[in-house]
Each structure stands twice: as structure tokens, then as C-alpha cells.
Image (cartoon, rainbow, N blue to C red):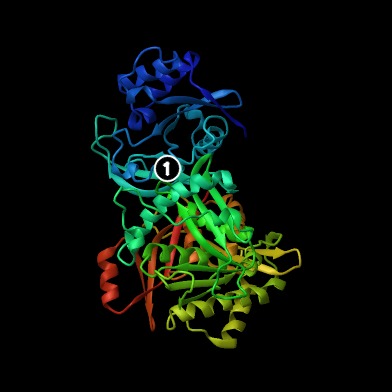
């Protein structure tokens, strides 16, 4: 099914206004005369000023097999407009944020699954042909329009908060959901030459200013000079000394920072030291720094040191998280007195081997297929490895049952392969190694709930290592959803250990939200809604700890 998009012209005005008269449009769409006038104004080339949102809306029409069936509208969101604090906080660092609104106008196209696909296809079209830098999309359905929220989340949007719509706009005075869909901006790491030395040296003033926030009290090096211009030590040796390297960082074509590498390390066997690392304030806090650091490590395989001044708490937190993610926790951290800085010799030093990390992060070729009896031993082994890790976090709830438990689980897995209400998939490498598996049960909900179909319950869902969630884990859940959709499943529920942060992050990236938390101690297990704070506090006061979380979402 190929959906086509084009901008609204006068040829489609009668069709659009007929859609706006439909009851489903009248209920949630802005039918004010000002809005209708703005659509006409746009279709006629905006030859006159508009009183509706400053005339900044762009209107689009969607076609399926040549027939128009939907209208979309986009507007570039900036801090200059009165868009509210919740939206302001989530504007893209690059300045390419767009607000969306959307309706299927032709009732003939209802209930056929076109809603989420149209929105997803439009975003792809918009980013390819209209603004290649568009990396953040915002949509804000009213809270009393749950169908819209469901469609948007199926199209890849995440619900980030609720807010009260303000101002002289449609929906003012009502609670709305704020949903976001984000894309990674294009980031470049460019080896710098002597021509780039002045630029990096100028940026170093702001680097020193950033350091002064937390380190200003420990050295006069971070005191502001009399002329009001911060000074940095000279970085020219990074452009002269062949053992050093300098890189410029760009987001799209905008300078965003620098990276300076040297081989001045405390350990003689270490290959590289992160000499200086700076991302300008505009691009801080959006994950760009982590992407740059990890790409630098991929570019320079070997043993590394990253040295951090203990007072620099924000840097310490950043480096520990970035290194831990990259190495899957395989790093050393210790306090040392360094010889290369007489002003701040006491350092926290991270040591790690990127060669091993690079190998760990390579995803082998694999296929996802229906599970077989011959898989069960490997499935039990993967399950046992994860359970042993869980036991360290929750010794009582996840206590290992020994070999008898393994035998019981193998027998159980084999029995499930014969059960018609269970769906089981295995990920297998080219060398026939089992890299992950998923076991799901199709089940009706209790009569007091009505999600609109069957629920897919996923309990046993494992991958061989944490770095495989985004590849193998994603394929396993994708295959599972496709298999059960035809069987009438509309809701997915995944059980996850509360401490299992890599799996929790993966499930969140799949647009699944925490719905319930199971709390367990000795032989008591209590299920509690994640939002039910009074009950959660009570259970905590009863010495019950969070053991598992249930992530819930729709099936695309």
C-alpha cells in the first residue's frame, strides 16, 4: 500500500471542508472560521496575512490509490511562540522541531489500519523531501480522545506528559497528552588541521567556563581574568605532535565541539587518553556527547584511559555511564595521583579495552524462526544465566532452584511448544548458536478490562548479552507481534525485572510503558499499578521490594 502526499491546493478545498463537516471531525478538530480561512489562505499561496498561528501552518493531503482520504498540518515549533513550558522543554537542540495535527477525513478508510501507517509514512516523506534535518515531532491529542493517542503511539510516538492547553486555541482549558517522536541528528567527527586550531582554541574559552562551574574552587586556572575572557592552555601541540589527534565535532554542518586525544597515560601499556572533550552547551544533554565518545572509541580500538577531576561531578557521571554502556560494564575505576597535572593531580581514572568492547558490540548474522524441541537446552541455559544475575539483585524473589529447577523448566518449555495458545520464537546465528528467545501466551483479559481483543503476555524473553536487545530483541518482538496480530491480539504485556535497566530501556524504546509492578518478599507477591503511589508507599513500608515490572502497549 503506497500512500502519497502533497501540499493542499485549491483543488482540494471542497473535499477538505466536506470532511470538516463529518461528525468525527466536528468532535475533535478545530472548526473555527479562522482555521478554515487559514486553509484557504494557504491553498491560495498565502497572499494575505493570516490571523491563525501567524500563518505558519503548512497543510498536506494524503492519497491512497489516487483517492484523497486524510489531511495533515505541520508547523515549526520555536521558543518564540507561546507553546507552553512542556513543549519548550522538549524542543530539538538543532531547532528542527515540528508540531503535527492529523485526521482521516474520509470515513471509508476507518478501521483498516491506515491511521498509524499514514502518520509514520508522512514523517518519512517529510524528512526526505521537506526538511532533512527534522528530528523532533510533537503531537498533542486531547485526553478524552484515547483512539488518537493509540494511533500516534503505534506510529512511533511516546507519551511524555500531560498538560493543560492554554491560550486562544482549539482545546483550550482541556487536558492534553504530549507525545514525541525523535530522530538522531546527523553528527560528524572531522579530523582537524592547523587551519582549525584557532577555532578550537576559541572554543576552549567556553570549555574552561564549563569546567569552572564545578572545579572553579580548586584552582586559580578557572578564575575569570580581569578582561572578562576565560583563557585556556594552548592546544597547538595537538596539531604538531604526531602522537596526538584533534577532531572537530559537527551536528549537521554546525560546529558543536571538539575532541583531543593524547597518549599521556598513567599505564605504559595504555594506547589512548581522552585529553580534552567538549560539546557546546546548545548540544549538551541530548545524547550527542555519548554518541561522539563511543564513535571515537570505535575509531581507535585499544586500551584507554579517561581521567576526571573528582570535583567535576557532572563529567564523572557522564563518563561512567557512557563507558559502562560501551563496554557492557567491563572497565576499571580507581583514584590515582597523576604526574601530568600539578594543579589537580588527584584524578578518578577509568581504564577499559575498546577492542574487546567493539567485538562485544558486533551483532552476528542471525535468523528468527519458530522455536524447536532442540532449542530447549540452550533456552534453559540463557534463562539460567539471566536468573543468576537477577538473584544478585533480589536474592529472595529470584532464588535459583538448582539443577532440579533447570530440568523442570526444560520440561515446561517442551510442553509449551505443543500448546496452541503459546507462541515461541528463537534467534539463531549462522553458526547455529542460540542468541535469544521469546515465549508468549495469548490470553483474554478479565471481564472488567476491555482492551479490544486478546492480550499477549510475554514472560520469558532473553537475549545472550545486553548489547543485543536493540537488534535481536527487537526482531524477536517484531516477529511475535506479526504472528499474533492475525489471531486478534491488541495488547502486549512484558514482564521485566525492575533492576534490569538494559531490558527496561529496550522495552521503553518499543513504546511500552510501565503498567504494574510486582512486589515480592519471601512468599508474598503483590501486583501494584506503577502510578498508584499511595499503594506503592504502603507496600514499601511493609518491607516489600519491587521485583518485576509489567510493560504494556498496543500491537502494531
Residue ID at (60%, 87%): 403
**Does any portion of residue 492 appear in the rendered image?**
no
Residue ID at (57%, 34%): 128
Residue 187: x, y in percent? Answer: 55, 46
State the residue in front, 343 or 191.
343
User: Which residue is disc 1 drawn over?
Assistant: 92
Residue ID at (27%, 38%): 165
State the residue in front, 552 or 121.
121
Residue 42: x, y in percent? Answer: 42, 18
Which quadrant is the N terminus positioned in? top right
**Residue lying at the far right of the rendered structure:** 431
State the residue in front, 344 or 358.
344
User: In which quarter of the view is residue 309 placed?
Assistant: bottom left
**Residue lying at the far front of the rendered structure:** 226
User: In which quarter of the view is residue 383 placed?
Assistant: bottom right
Residue 158: x, y in percent? Answer: 43, 48
Amino acid at each position: 500500500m503506497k500512500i502519497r502526499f502533497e501540499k493542499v491546493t485549491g483543488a482540494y478545498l471542497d473535499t477538505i471542508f466536506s470532511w470538516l463537516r463529518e461528525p468525527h471531525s466536528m468532535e475533535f478538530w478545530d472548526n473555527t472560521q479562522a482555521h478554515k480561512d487559514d486553509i484557504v489562505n494557504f491553498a491560495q499561496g498565502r497572499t494575505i496575512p493570516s490571523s491563525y498561528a501567524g500563518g505558519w501552518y503548512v497543510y498536506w493531503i494524503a492519497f491512497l490509490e489516487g483517492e484523497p482520504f486524510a489531511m495533515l498540518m505541520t508547523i515549526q515549533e520555536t521558543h518564540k511562540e507561546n507553546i507552553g513550558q512542556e513543549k519548550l522543554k522538549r524542543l530539538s537542540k538543532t531547532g528542527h522541531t515540528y508540531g503535527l495535527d492529523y485526521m482521516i477525513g474520509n470515513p471509508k478508510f476507518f478501521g483498516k489500519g491506515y491511521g498509524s501507517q499514514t502518520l509514520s509514512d508522512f514523517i518519512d516523506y517529510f524528512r526526505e523531501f521537506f526538511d532533512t534535518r527534522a528530528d523532533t515531532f510533537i503531537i498533542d491529542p486531547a485526553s478524552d480522545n484515547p483512539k488518537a493517542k493509540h494511533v500516534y503511539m503505534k506510529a512511533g510516538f511516546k507519551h511524555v506528559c500531560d498538560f493543560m492547553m492554554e491560550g486562544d486555541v482549539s482545546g483550550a482549558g482541556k487536558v492534553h497528552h504530549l507525545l514525541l517522536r525523535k530522530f538522531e541528528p546527523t553528527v560528524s567527527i572531522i579530523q582537524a588541521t592547523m587551519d582549525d586550531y584557532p577555532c578550537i582554541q576559541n572554543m576552549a574559552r567556553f570549555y574552561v567556563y564549563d569546567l569552572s562551574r564545578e572545579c572553579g574552587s580548586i584552582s586559580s586556572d578557572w578564575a575569570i581574568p580581569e578582561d572578562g575572557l576565560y583563557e585556556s592552555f594552548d592546544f597547538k601541540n595537538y596539531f604538531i605532535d604526531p602522537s596526538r589527534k584533534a577532531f572537530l565535532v559537527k551536528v549537521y554542518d554546525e560546529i558543536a565541539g571538539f575532541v583531543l586525544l593524547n597518549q599521556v597515560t598513567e599505564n605504559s601499556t595504555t594506547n589512548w587518553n581522552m585529553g580534552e572533550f567538549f560539546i557546546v552547551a546548545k548540544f549538551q544533554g541530548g545524547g550527542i556527547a555519548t554518541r561522539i565518545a563511543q564513535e571515537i572509541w570505535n575509531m581507535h580500538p585499544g586500551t584507554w584511559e579517561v581521567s576526571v577531576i573528582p570535583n567535576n561531578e557532572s563529567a564523572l557521571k557522564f563518563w561512567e555511564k557512557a563507558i559502562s554502556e560501551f563496554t557492557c560494564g567491563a572497565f576499571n575505576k580507581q583514584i590515582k595521583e597523576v604526574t601530568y597535572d600539578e594543579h589537580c593531580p588527584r584524578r578518578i581514572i577509568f581504564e577499559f579495552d575498546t577492542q574487546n568492547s567493539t567485538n562485544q558490540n558486533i551483532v552476528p548474522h542471525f535468523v528468527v524462526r519458530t522455536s524447536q524441541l532442540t532449542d530447549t537446552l540452550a533456552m534453559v541455559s540463557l534463562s539460567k544465566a539471566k536468573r543468576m544475575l537477577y538473584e544478585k539483585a533480589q536474592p529472595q524473589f529470584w532464588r535459583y532452584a538448582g539443577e532440579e529447577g533447570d530440568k523442570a523448566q526444560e520440561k515446561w518449555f517442551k510442553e509449551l511448544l505443543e500448546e496452541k495458545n503459546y507462541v515461541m520464537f528463537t534467534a539463531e546465528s549462522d553458526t547455529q548458536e542460540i542468541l535469544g528467545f521469546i515465549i508468549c501466551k495469548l490470553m483474554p483479559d478479565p471481564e472488567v478490562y476491555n482492551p479490544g481483543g486478546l492480550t499477549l503476555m510475554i514472560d520469558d524473553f532473553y537475549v545472550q548479552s545486553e548489547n543485543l536487545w536493540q537488534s535481536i530483541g527487537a526482531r524477536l518482538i517484531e516477529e511475535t507481534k506479526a504472528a499474533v496480530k492475525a489471531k486478534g491480539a491488541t495488547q502486549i504485556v512484558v514482564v521485566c525485572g525492575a533492576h534490569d535497566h538494559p531490558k527496561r530501556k529496550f522495552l521503553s524504546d518499543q513504546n511500552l510503558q510501565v503498567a504494574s509492578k510486582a512486589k515480592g518478599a519471601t512468599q508474598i507477591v503483590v501486583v501494584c499499578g506503577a502510578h498508584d503511589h499511595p499503594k506503592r508507599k504502603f507496600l514499601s513500608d511493609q518491607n516489600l521490594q519491587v521485583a518485576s515490572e509489567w510493560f504494556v502497549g498496543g500491537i502494531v
